[in-house]
Amino acid sequence: MSTTTQLRPTSSPGQDPVRVERRLPRFAPLGLFLAGIALGAGLSALTGFSVTSTVIYGVILGTLAVYVASRAVEGRRKATDRLVTSLVTTAFGIAMVPLVSLVYTVLDRGLARLDADFFSASMFRVVGEGGGAYHAIIGTLVITALATVISVPIGLLTAIYLVEYGTGRLKKAITFFVDVMTGIPSIVAGLFAFALFTLLFGNSFRAGVMGAVALSVLMIPVVVRSCEEVLKLVPNELREASYALGVPKWRTVVKVVLPTAIAGLGTGITLSVARVIGETAPLLITVGLITGTNLNPFDGRMATLPVFAYYQLTQPGTATQAFLDRAWTAALVLIVFVMALNILARLISRFFAPKTGR
């Protein structure tokens, strides 16, 4: 068995020898791993070169080379550490492949129609090239905003009840149903909203509010869960200090608990909006698609970006390439919306977090 240290004699008599740790050179693990990748490419070429086989052979050989070299020089513990590091890094690289591929594909195909007309024109009386997604962008913003107005008060108040007031069977029942709602398919939310408004207003009724209700069914459990976890992080000492001063419970929640948790609450709500802004199935059932602009969510169909992209991709007209270009650009704009919401969530978390320094 190889050792990881050597004894080096000292210049002064009577002193204990100095232990010197044996280590691989700094860039040796990376070099060995790249050498394994190169050898994997050679093996892949012998059997018919392909990127997949090159990656598989290269990762296996590179990881094995790093482990063997580290075991020989540094010992078993350090070799095991390097082996796990190689496996984790490889897993991260594999996970990044579909993400990078998706972003590259959407950018490559979506930039073709990312122009002023796409944001300023609708599809009204457009059957071929030209047109844009102005009506769909407006519809997405209106419906998502309305869904947020419906979901945030319900979800936040539910979370406050579960953390501050809830006890016994009612609390357990609410928690159970929130967990169930978190996992329901989005198509079920669309069917629920469709059935609800059909029973109330008839089978011919279509409006943006139907889509907002469907999205709120998906959004409420996310808001409840995120807000509940944030409220639980508020120290009980703050509540007890407020109670000791004679402040009633409702005022403690409003003046102490919520301001302390405002950064986490804002982050959770923003991420829940990002969760539903790209939903397609509920909006296909409820609001459908129109070619013009409708700003009234309570009267008539409304276009949305996910549904717009779906119909542009699945029902192209005579100018097929123009329809495909609009679909990819709509997908790109949706990704930008989601990315902007995630950045906004990070900014809220950073700037509104309680300041602990003096």
Image (cartoon, rainbow, N blue to C red):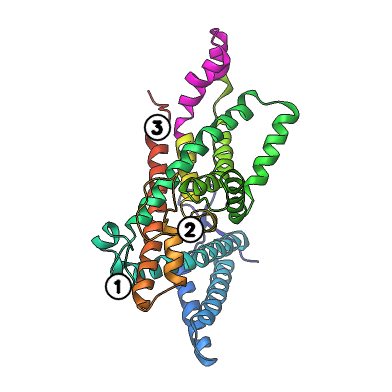
| Left or right placement of residue 28 versus residue 214 in this view | left
Q: Compare residues 59 and 118 and report the one nearer the observer.
A: 118
Look at the picture and state if 326 lies above or below 51: above
Q: Position of residue 331 (x, y in %)?
A: 41, 62
Q: Earlier in the sequence, mark 3 or mark 1?
A: 1
Q: Is residue 162 left or right of residue 302?
A: right
- What residue is shown with label 2? 288
Question: What span is colored magenta in the figure?
Answer: 238-263
Residue nearer the viewer, 350 or 169: 169
Label 1 to label 2: alpha-carbon separation? 22 Å
Q: Tell me residue 306's x, y (percent).
A: 45, 59
Q: Amino acid at mark 3?
A: Phe
Task: Measure how far apart labels 3 and 1 are at the Cα level.
Answer: 46 Å
Residue 268 location, x and y as percent? 49, 40
* Mark before the other along the chain sequence, 1 or 2: 1
Q: Earlier in the sequence, mark 2 or mark 3?
A: 2
Question: SS at mark 3?
Answer: loop
What amino acid type is highlighted by mark number 1?
Glu
Q: Residues within 10 Å of mark 3 (few under 14, many from 20)?
A: some
Residue bearing the label numbered 1: 129
Residue at horizontal 53 percent and vertical 13 percent from the top: 242
Q: Is residue 66 visible?
A: yes
Q: Is residue 265 magenta?
A: no
Whether residue 72 is situated above or below residue 43 in the rendered picture: above
> In the rendered image, which residue does mark 3 sit on?
352
Query: Where residue 212 sits: x, y (%)?
Result: 49, 46
Asked whether residue 25 appears in the rendered view, the answer is: no
Helix, strand or loop for disc 1:
loop
Amino acid type shown at disc 2 = Gly
